[in-house]
Image (tube, grey):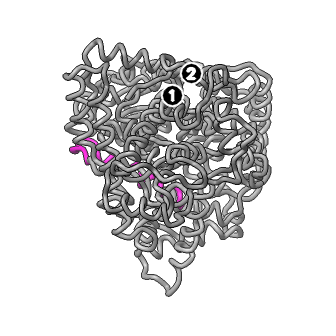
Amino acid sequence: MQAMRWMMVAAIACGSAVSASAFAAAQQGKAHAGTPLGVDLKGMDRSVQPGDDFDDYANGSWRKNAVIPADRASTGIFLEVFQKAEKRNAQIIREAGAGHPAAGSNARRIADYYAAFMNEAAIEKAGLDPLKPELDKIDAIKTRTDLSRVLGGQLRADVDPINATSWHTEHLFGLFVTQGLEDPSHNIAYLLQGGLGMPNRDYYLKNDAEMVGFRDKYKAYVAATLQRAGMADAKAKADAIFALEAKIAQAQESLVESEDVHKANNPWPASAYAQKAPGIDWNAFFEAAGLAGQPVVDAWQPQAIKGLSALVASEPLQTWKDYLAFHTINESAGLLPKAYADASFEFYGHTLTGTPKQRDRWKRAIGAVNNDLGDAVGQIYVKKYFPASSKAQVQDMVKNILAAFDERVDSLDWMTPATKQKAKAKIETLKVGVGYPETWRDYGALEIRPDDALGNHLRAVAQEYAHQKAKLGRSVDRGEWWMTPQTVNAVNLPLQNALNFPAAILEAPFFDPKADAAANYGSIGAVIGHEISHSFDNTGAEFDAQGRLANWWTPEDLAHFKAAGQKLAAQYDAYEPLPGLHINGQQTLGENIADVSGLTAAWIAYHKSLGGKNAPVIGGMSGDQRFFLAFAQSWRTKTRDAALRQQVITDGHAPGRFRAQTVRNIDAWYQAFDPKPGQKLYLDPKERVHIW
């Protein structure tokens, strides 16, 4: 659900308010009058001991009976909430064309974009024609300077430098625009690695049977795509393309390396690229990318950029041309004739994630409209489904969770007053966006035609690139949103010291104002706490209150913090989602810190909401039992093995099943469920990880 991967969050929800506010008091009053429990009792498996497997205890019966939809790689609470938003978006988009909206209006753009996507006859008739200008540029490459110019012209806006190998992988590089790591006064350009057709470098470099099988099927897919496009010697070209991508993968930095923002702090003068990363004609590249004249372009993954540039010089020009032609087609396969779209799904959907059925075309169309006209749809979404009263209520919740986190900082016995002061300053200046942005994207310059599906998307991509590029040199907008309101997710933005909580995630079962307060705190409260905690995870803690990369820790405090993080990493290293495949605790460390810390803050907030009273017993369960069950049930998931493998290898989040086990680090969970020494989740008090 991804601004830096540590700006991205859990695609799931979180909790309720913190103080004894009128809302919380009302919640407690309802609890005695038969308030909905907010916990799924039927989904539990009481034959499992909570201390052995809390996820199975909370979700075991649900998982045994859950059926993953044929067009999905997984199912769970996230999908339930997503489908609610999807139905709403479908209604918004289909109604946009009613009444013949005026030309140039957002309603007309929405209607025409959707109509074009659904017009399969026009797409079949167009064939590859919409890509002809780009394919002609590639075919005309005669020199390395020509190649450099085409590569620069293909640069696209990226919002995720850490996870750059799964965002815009069809392009050799990506562009990210935000404030300087050490200078928060204005935006600069960051150049990111890319260039792969499979999810990340591990798919090319690991030699287990699954990866070898994926590689063989990928080469077959590349050959079939080239043959379908009428290119001669398709198999030989596919082999050469794969060999080039394997070298690109070898040159790339790993996900863990990309998470180290200190390694990313390389503000190279644009004029120095020729000397620092020889191989590409950087003058031609930056001119074609519209970056000529930029004084600085930060190299986020410097070794990868050096390696990729060297490959531009060393690998055969024809191989590069074939590589570019394939990726130009492959990137647009979903908007090309059915044979291309079906083959793309067969590899990326069926082979790589195990999903047996492609999503219905109307669902894909809804997703495409939301991707390219997100704010246009979002403005309508919040008017219909997120009233001002809801926004005010959630803002109150966030304030209360922030207060709980602030209190938690005060109580840390290992942190010195100097470091506490800096941490509290971050909390005080954190800018939280709830529901929707204060300003909306202007689509006035974007041409949308009712009969040009691929052209619409390509023009939207170009406009997004222009939008990001236009921010260069400007002062930073700390209120900028990186998600649309109809997105079921949330995000932390360390460089902005800001959070976004879109309207669509603030829905039941994540948040239900009619439900028991314990359930709301355990679910949406923990997500709110999670996002706040990202400002203090292993990456967020590197940034100060202004979003500047700066060390604000005393040496002793920093050593304690890092040691606690490594204990948590080791804890997750031991989890084995599939035989022989373990979670990478370092890769998932930021998310795991946020889970532990966010759950702690939400629990504090829940108890503050009780106003000094004891929580009511409902359904035979104490308040804390309901709180922790709601948390675990928010993470209930059932995933196909291939998709689970891909998640473990490529994602910074641990699978939901293991996120539910976060409770083993929370002292209150032990008091609520009384796990015993010797049970699988039990940790001696000295072994529990308490970071914030």
Q: Kindly identify the amino acid type of the residue bearing the numbered disc 2.
A: Leu
The residue tagged 2 is 683
Which one is in front, 427 or 226? 427
Q: Amino acid at mark 1?
A: Asn
Query: Taking the image as drawn, is residue 147 in sight?
Result: no
Q: Is residue 213 above or below residue 94?
A: above
Q: Quadrant of residue 544?
A: top left
Q: Residue at x 54, y 68 (%)?
A: 89
Q: Position of residue 247 (x, y in %)?
A: 62, 21
- Crowd band around label 1 with a 10 angstrom C-alpha radius: few (<14), some (14–19), many (20+): many
Q: Is residue 614 left or right of residue 452?
A: left
Which of the two residues, 584 or 113, is positioned nearer the viewer here? 584
Q: Secondary structure at mark 1?
A: helix
Q: Where's residue 591, x and y in %?
A: 49, 33
Q: Is residue 18 above or below residue 435?
A: above
Image height check: is 243 above or below 399? above
Is 8 displayed left or right of 558 in the figure? right
Q: Are marks 1 and 2 in contact (CB under 8 Å)?
A: yes
Magenta-span inclusion, residue 464: yes
Going 46% across and 67% down the picture, which residue do you hit? 377
Question: Quick one: label 1 or label 2, which is nearer the N terminus?
Answer: 1
Between 132 and 600, the residue placed more toward the observer is 600
Point 44% across, 52% down: residue: 462
In magenta, the rendered stretch is 455-477
Depth check, front residue: 565 or 229: 565
Residue 333 can be seen in this image: yes
Q: Residue at x 71, y 54 (%)?
A: 42
Say if the magenta span includes residue 123. Answer: no
The residue that disc 1 covers is 665
